[in-house]
Image (spheres, grey):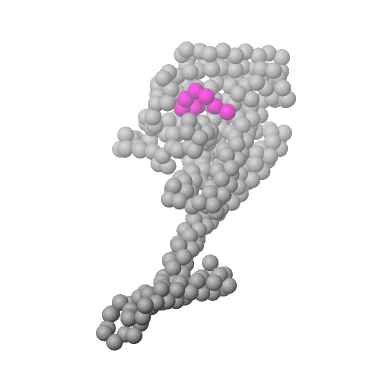
Amino acid sequence: MNRLIKKRSGKAGMPPGTLVYVGEQKAEKVKISIIDYNETQFEEREVKIIEESFPFKDKPTVTWINIDGLHEVENIEKLGSHFGFHPLLMEDILNTDQRPKMEDYGDHIFIVLKMLRPGKNKDEIEAEQVSLIYGPNFVISFQEREGDVFNSVRDRIRKSKGRIRKVGADYLAYTLLDAIVDNYFVILEDIGEKIEDTEQRLTTNPSTETLQYIRSLKNEMIFLRKSIWPLRELVNGLERCESKLISESTCIYLRDVYDHTIQIIDTVESYRDMISGMVDIYLSSVSNKMNEVMKVLTIFASIFIPLTFIAGIYGMNFEFMPELKWPWGYFALLGFMASVGISLVVYFKRKKWL
């Protein structure tokens, strides 16, 4: 799982708007892909330098520019200078521990959110910051590395499925946002299965490994809550339709994303409560297990206390103890001790203590 807070010591003391990439280099090289389309035309290609994307700014068609890899800061700087983006906006793109948010700059809207997916280890969740900028006829997306949840969107554009090629850039931005939010349900389903398996282990055989796993689940939920909770404010800001860049028809779809966001938040809160309750279940199970052990030990002690008392008396070997010289004394005493032990076991069973 990603760190909850990334180091920003490299930017300490620098003026606002200074472009410094905060994060680890997750791509060997920067990949720039462009999809340009309208209802009748479609073009898709990959370019080697950022300048090749500049002519698409003023085209009447809808253009989606996707950049994988943020470590080459000069690409962000050149793109921002050509499209007229604010320096603080470009700084936020490079600060990959941003809180999900939406900012309206008038002629373009800036969105930051987290894209979640399963990690190489099935028990981990990988998070990646995705930044979206969309204007009247373009959408620009920034990712830390290649690979995302947008393949379904690309397929819809290529095959002209639905209404995506009949509408503007605001609908494209909505589909990208919707793809990220829908993927949260996949992550939450996996976590739900983990919680169910852990609950079964708690009831059958709780162990310290189980407690450690519960703690890792708890950390995952803290990270998810941090990534998902601000989404409600983000989508709500888009849904208000105060920007001229968002059409009323797209607002209807944004309301659906808002509903999904509320559902996801409710699920996260439910899972957090379940995981907190699992800790109590673990402590109760361990306590019950300890009580069972103490119960067995107490029963054994109760059986052997009278036997030890009898053996202690006849172990004193006083001279005038009549049973010491009786030929059958040893066997009689053993029989008496056995009858005492059996009587106690029968009594405990009748009381259902055994």
- For the N terminus, the quadrant is top left
Q: Is residue 314 left or right of residue 86?
A: left
Above or below: residue 22 compared with residue 197: above
Quarter holding residue 190: top right
Which residue is found at the position 38% from the left and 32% from the top?
Answer: 22
Magenta region includes residue 146 = yes
Query: Does the magenta-highlighted stretch encompass residue 15?
Result: no
Q: How many marks?
A: 0
Please give the name of the residue rendered at 54% of the width and 30% of the height, measured from the top-left corner: 132
Residue 175 x %, y %:
64, 30
- In the image, 47 versus 245, the foreground residue is 47
The answer to whether residue 295 is above or below residue 317 is above
Would you say 60 lies left or right of 301 here?
right
Residues in magenta?
142-149
Give the camera-side residue of 23 and 329.
329
- Give the percent coordinates (x, y) of residue 330: 37, 75
Picture coordinates of residue 109 (x, y %)? 56, 33
For the stretch drawn in magenta, what is the main secondary structure?
loop
Farthest-out residue, left: 319
160 or 195, nearer to the observer: 195
Q: x%, y% of residue 4?
A: 42, 42
Residue 226 shows up from this direction: no
Q: Is residue 157 visible?
A: yes
Q: Residue at x 47, y 48 (%)?
A: 210
The single residue placed furthest to the front in the displayed view is 327
95 versus 335 height, above or below: above
Identify which residue is drawn at 32% across, 34% down: 10
